[in-house]
Amino acid sequence: MSKKLLCLMVLLGTSFCSVGQEEASAIKNIFNEELSNGHAYTMLDHLANRIGGRLSGSPQAAVAVEWGKSTMESMSIDRVWLQEVMVPHWVRGEKEQASITVGSKKQVLRICALGNSIGTGPKGIAAAVIEVKSFLELEKLGKEKIAGNIVFFNRPMDPKEIYTGTAYGGAVDQRGRGVVEAARFGALGVVVRSVTLAMDDHPHTGSVQYSNTVAKIPACAISTMGASVLSQAILGNPKAKFFFRQTCEMLPDVKSHNIVGEIKGSTFPDEIILVGGHLDSWDLGTGAHDDGAGVVQSMEVLRLFKALGMRPRRTIRAVLFMNEENGTRGAMKYAELSAQNKEHHLAAMESDEGGFTPRDFSVEGDGFDRIRSWIPLLAPYGIQGIVHEHTGTDLGPLKKLGVTLVGYRSDSQRYFDYHHAETDTFDKVNKRELELGAANMAALIWLISEHGL
Amino acid sequence: MSKKLLCLMVLLGTSFCSVGQEEASAIKNIFNEELSNGHAYTMLDHLANRIGGRLSGSPQAAVAVEWGKSTMESMSIDRVWLQEVMVPHWVRGEKEQASITVGSKKQVLRICALGNSIGTGPKGIAAAVIEVKSFLELEKLGKEKIAGNIVFFNRPMDPKEIYTGTAYGGAVDQRGRGVVEAARFGALGVVVRSVTLAMDDHPHTGSVQYSNTVAKIPACAISTMGASVLSQAILGNPKAKFFFRQTCEMLPDVKSHNIVGEIKGSTFPDEIILVGGHLDSWDLGTGAHDDGAGVVQSMEVLRLFKALGMRPRRTIRAVLFMNEENGTRGAMKYAELSAQNKEHHLAAMESDEGGFTPRDFSVEGDGFDRIRSWIPLLAPYGIQGIVHEHTGTDLGPLKKLGVTLVGYRSDSQRYFDYHHAETDTFDKVNKRELELGAANMAALIWLISEHGL
């Protein structure tokens, strides 16, 4: 990404702004309103602190749906509705337990079950631990060394990556697919180093993907400090026994909802610009950055236009997706209904990289050059550039419909410190950083709405 | 600043990079080393958590001097020395007390004495409160309304400013000069709204400047939440009495030191490039962002060059200034000695805006275009641009010597939340954000050292 960004910075000056002073004023108004009277922070306070963690299928997720609907209804926008969707219902069960025993010395370790994982049974599992850093290493060890043992995936995120999302992408395969790769060789269970750059004692959850062709084995995440302890303990001690116990289980699907609110376009009502985030969150923290921030920023875009009397030329639709974390069912349902109803989405923007200070926008599909030409208008508000990168999980199903996808990306340095951990709480969100995100999103949506792509 | 930045972003592409792939590799090495093996964070841990708040003249400041010297000595650089300087020795005394009483109802408020302020006497001061938002308003009220009362300066920082330093600059006159302006009209004391954008109950200290021609009256800061309570309480209640008590006092000057460490230039040893921060801090917190961050980043620049075997062509000097917070004596002494010794400083860089994620560099003096031409090399590491703005307080005395001044500016959104308050502690600093700052500083210093200005 470094080279791309560098190239963009150099190219930036060669693209002249295609819009002028009028738009600069509109954008200034958006920022003034948000920084003086913004609602994003108080909405997030409610969502994170009053409702809390809201995993798909949980009672809190149902409360969050009601809250999202009533909050958007209170904005006097043109229309608010729910989209019914069946979602997975995974429950964590009792507090997880883990320890490593070397001879007579037992050390307790902090773990959490990985999302969608099966449990260990009430007695837990105890076995020797085989540490690997990659699937290749696992394959080389083969069935002979792996069968009957617990596999410990311990490859850290690469601290040298500047954009931490890249480092995450380089490590998260262990969490997502490790359970299948290890089961192929007869492992009894999997323990994965938390996918974070922080060195602390908080395990980070996240979903695993089972395969229909391989036996399901239980998987947990261990804190990064715990991973160091575990790695050290088993070094030269092949008889060391790792124990873990988790009573999580997947229950039958339950009914839940996406929430959609929209302001009809004055000139092109059939051209839709979507802005969204996901309402569900993991259960350990309160989903403040992931993705309470994106949820309230998306709703705030509508509120800003209403508060400022800005009537967009195209239809602006805020979507709070359900079930991004462990199924993406809401996003698939939204795209399915959109295709059914023959809707035309001009663009779709997602905010799901935290509510930190603004950094840039990522774009997939058409419109890159157009959007780039507007970046100088957003630079005074912290937008450094625009990159050809992944935009957002919930936008994925819209890709095949030819929609221009946009990701709002806040500064990535702290995101994975809290991501999927009990530390993803409201106190980690700075009011102004959250607001600058909402206002930058509104500004770009306004430009797209006024000028098309 | 918005227009300037916008203009810069547009212009950026027109300046071609004057250096090429070799420098890009050197910079990449700097970042790889810092993000993989950086010492900045552990140094800051020691300074903030082990040594703590270190106001000029305090025992902790003396310990910090010893620590700074021995830490630089451990780096095997060419030379480390102390510069003796006499500094003010202000002490806070007992925990401050304050309350507002309306009729029989008394409410306790959180305040702190402002730095360099006199005390109230052991019994404290109680008087009616006159709230103003500006010196003009104060002048309009005049002696008749002000004499015998306590003046409450309650103009908030403007949340609409994107760069919070500008908002700070628009409010801090109340804290610095309020005490003189109020005393002119016979006020008994001054209470100032904390100069922060955060709405919480932490008072923020900072220095006041007395005048020799006006009576000295005591001054304190009240938390922003306290300011709201106080403002509400006195509304329509002219008989409401504000009470405050503080036993702070200014003691005789004491001997302290700047610490200087340097790597001699291989080609131009007489051309000095300075990088520095201030070692002293306020006493309420532990001076983590202000300015522990700048101190460890400056030392880290030297360590990076040593660790990577990069021998700079010009002399690089890290300076830990004493007494930035309430006197700037260290900076004045440094410039005085530099002039005495006929030293030639090519450039001087300061980091004193917190250890947050990188944003830009400010420049005063010659070399702006040259430095701007290098920004594309730093853009992949979070540097968005370069601005003509104030660079740093400790660089001020070097200005008249014709030195190019550079300010490293990290993202400003959170800085004033913690600035001069008990919340400026190590846990508010993110390891990677701190490191990215150190590496960007090292990278720009390297470019100046290799290519001149």
Image: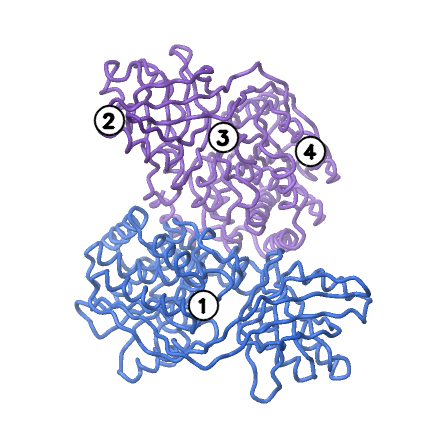
Chain colours: A purple, B blue
Query: Can you tell which quarter of the image residue B291 is in?
Result: bottom left
Q: Secondary structure at mark 3?
A: helix
Which residue is at a point 46% across and 82% down the rendered structure image? B252
Q: Amino acid at mark 3?
A: Thr
Q: Which residue is mark 1?
A: B388
Question: Earlier along the polypeptide chain: callout 3 or callout 2?
Answer: 2
Question: Of B93 and B339, which appears nearest the observer?
Answer: B93
Disc 3 is attached to a residue of which chain? A
Task: Name the disc covering residue A237, or none.
Answer: 2
In front: label 1 or label 4: 4
Where is residue B105 shown, x and y percent of the image? 78, 61
Q: Secondary structure at mark 2?
A: loop
Question: Earlier along the polypeptide chain: callout 4 or callout 3?
Answer: 4
Q: Amino acid at mark 2?
A: Asn
- Measure the alpha-carbon separation of dots 4 and 3: 23 Å
- Measure the alpha-carbon separation of dots 3 and 2: 42 Å
Q: Amino acid at mark 4?
A: Trp
- Asked whether disc 4 touches disc 3, contact meaning CB atoms under 8 Å apart, the reply is no
Where is residue A90 shown, x and y percent of the image? 54, 20
Which residue is at a point 48% across and 21% down the rendered structure image? A116
- Asked whether disc 2 touches disc 4, contact meaning CB atoms under 8 Å apart, the reply is no
